[in-house]
Structures are given as C-alpha cells and as structure tokens.
Amino acid sequence: MLLQETIDVICEVRQGLDASSLSSDTPFEELGLSSLELTEVIMELEERLDVDLDLDTVDAAEQLKTVGDIVGALDAIVKAKG
C-alpha cells in the first residue's frame, strides 16, 4: 500500500512518468526529481498519511535516494504511530 501510494504521488508531482516502470529500487536521480519535487512528494505523503517525516529539504535529498527509501521511512513512522 505505501509503495503504491508513494508511486502515485511521485507521478502526480512529476507528470509524464509511467507508474508501472517505478519500483522500490528506482532512484530519484533516474526520475530527474529535483529537491523541490522531492519535498513536494514528501509533503503530500505526510498529508495523506497524517504523519511527519521530520526531514528538511537538505536531509531528504541526502537520506532519501530511492522510492523504497521513502516507503521505508513512512513505514517506520506509520508502525510507530500504531
């Protein structure tokens, strides 16, 4: 569920991407996502899932390199939230 939700948001932010070509291993660099677009993805996911990743733009760009990195971070927070 989190993977598909993340892919959906990425495709909304970066229009023209084929969702079926994305996986948890897909690097953001390959998608051409800017740091601003990555921030938009994170903010939208936080809003949809009612969580807070507590990462600023610089931290996000340094720590989140793939689709799976965001999914992993979200999963940990969702599980901790209960």
Image (cartoon, rainbow, N blue to C red):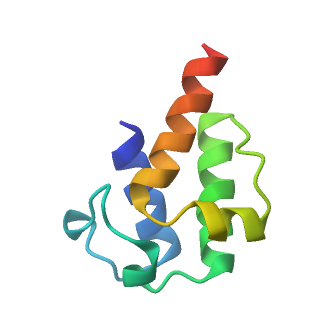
* Vertical placement of residue 48 versus 58, above or below: above
Q: How many marks?
A: 0
| Picture quadrant where residue 17 is located | bottom left
* Quadrant assignment for the N terminus: top left
Residue 19 image position (x, y, % from top left): 27, 66
Left or right of 45: which side holds 58?
right
Q: Residue furthest left?
A: 20
Indicate the quadrant containing the C terminus: top left, top right, bottom left or bottom right.
top right
Q: Is residue 41 left or right of residue 17?
A: right
Q: Residue at x 66, y 45 (%)?
A: 46
Residue that extends furthest to the top in the rendered view of this protein:
82
- Drawn side of residue 21 relative to residue 50, left or right: left
Please tell me which residue is depicted at 43% across the width and 80% down the height of the picture.
15
Residue at 35% over, 83% down:
16
Relative height, residue 32 to residue 22 (above, below): below
Q: Residue 39's x, y, as percent?
A: 68, 67
